[in-house]
Amino acid sequence: MEEQEKSLNFIEQIVEQDLAEGKNDGRIQTRFPPEPNGYLHIGHVKAICMDFGIAEKYNGVCNLRFDDTNPAKEDTEYVETIERDIAWLGFKWGKIFYASDYFQQLYDLAIRFIKEGKAYVDEQTAEQIAEQKGTPTEPGVASPYRDRPIEENLRLFEAMQRGEIEEGKMVLRAKIDMANPNMHFRDPIMYRIITSHPHHRTGTKWKVYPMYDFAHGQSDYFEGVTHSICTLEFEVHRPLYDYFLDQITGENFAGLSPYGPDYRPKQREFNRLNITYTVMSKRKMLQLVKEGLVAGWDDPRMPTVCGLRRRGYTPQAIRTFMDKIGYTKVEGMIDQGLLEHVIREDLKETAPRVCAIFDPVKLVITNYEGEGETLIAENIDGHEELGTREMKFGKELWIERGDFLEEADNKFYRLSPGGREVRLKASYIIQATGCEKDADGNITTVYATYDPDSKSGTEGGNRKTKATINWVECNSALNAEVRLYDRLFAVENPSAEEGDFRDLLNPDSLKVVTAKVESSLAKAQVHDHFQLLKQGYFVVDDDATPEHLILNRTCSLKDNYLK
């Protein structure tokens, strides 16, 4: 479907309606607000593509704002990796903000809430507060501290901030409605005490930290966000988002925003991304990393952005995937086969083809004379514009063990004694004459003759054969560590299964082999992509060196998704 014919998703429809109605003076501003407590995963990328994509499409701006309101879990390491991942995906933010930029403003707002009788300090435990919240069909029970005098609430909240109150002993709650059918309105917590961990930016200046529901909408408002786009789990939070904005917008509070009394952000939600054979829970991913069940956050089996990058996924393929799955209000599960399909479609037009032998057996061409020669092969057959590579050829070659059978029927078209002709990829036609075995009966060497007038690219090279096999010249071949990655979990939806999710890991998600590869790969650089003929698409790993080539399988050649 052509770009101009693509229908608008419902978020784009909302934006276009707002523009048509002249809201916010035609200004479009979004934000991507990750918490810097872990690595971005492909679920975040869906939000990134939405937030930045809306800004790009409607000539707006998307800012990056770190939701750093919980110093116990946050670190500058995560800030740096988030910035790197977004840039790698090809997006550019307008400015970088932090929720901590607004700590003073938020604290001042909390003081105002207390003075207006809209907030109070509660000394109950977290368990007691949760128990008194009630149920969706039963009203909650008011805290015994709900009607504290305003002066006492001010004194205690200021003592909390000075560090005079022990962590966990008190919280500040909004005083709203303990009988509201939306349980988020039942006196939600606005502030809690955290003194056990210094903040990555503000150190120990603050002893109280705002909760997400209080900080998020206000931060949007301070920045001038027009469209606050979230995933569906925040839909039930939207009325509270609007409630807090109601308290600080309008004529009386116009000075809080440079955009005037009529301005206020609009929150809208879309469906999250769930993919088969993996988990999207940051908590579960952290368990996998900490327990050594994967090799780190950038393990190529992980759905993290850095893991996908190391696996060989390209930014364009990931963004194409997001375009294909779209944005709706309905939760669902996306087949991982679609993700594999888009990277396969991307790489098949760009990844040079090379030969690699995974289960080698030696082939000796008995009538070949001389020290060898250099053949020229196209990087991708039929695409001269993509260049060529040199292939060393000689008397002794490595071929796949499965490409030779000592005794074969007429359905086996590869090497077998008896006069059958087989072409060596981009070189000569050969015929097998026999083989040599070890004491256990294993074939160690295959013998063949070649036709010197059958060289590919020459007049005699036009002769057709029923099979073409891959090969690598023995003396020039490189040894490569090849990591064959598969799906991380053995079941389609591990999050829906009972029991420990770690018991559902695929025991065959990684196999490592040593392969013989073409000498042209001696120049390969980290993150270079290749198609290893008949094996799949591979990328040079981050840990590869000129002395030790490491290749990660991105995906196989077989594409079952369209079927």
Image (cartoon, rainbow, N blue to C red):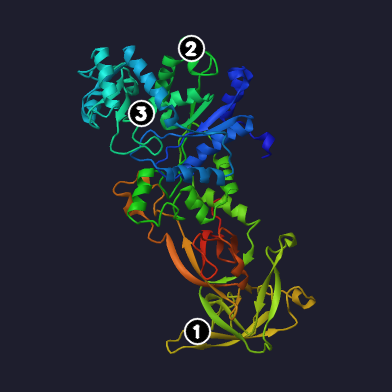
Q: Amino acid at mark 1?
A: Ile
Whether residue 79 appears in this view of the structure is yes
Q: Amino acid at mark 3?
A: Met
Q: Nearer the viewer, residue 299 or 258?
A: 258
Residue depicted at x 51% and y 69%: 548
| Position of 420 relative to 54 (above/below) | below
Q: Earlier in the sequence, mark 1 or mark 3?
A: 3
Q: Position of residue 96 (x, y in %)?
A: 52, 35
Residue depicted at x 68% and y 79%: 429
Furthest residue in direction top, as rendered: 251
Q: Earlier in the sequence, mark 3 or mark 2?
A: 3
Q: Secondary structure at mark 1?
A: strand
Q: Which mark is residue 250?
A: 2
- In this figure, which residue is indicated by the disc labeled 1? 443
- In this figure, which residue is indicated by the disc labeled 3? 211
Q: Amino acid at mark 2?
A: Gly
Number of residues whose C-alpha sits closer than 10 Å to that of mark 2, classed few (under 14), some (14–19) or many (20 or more):
some
Is label 3 in contact with label 2 (beta carbons under 8 Å)?
A: no
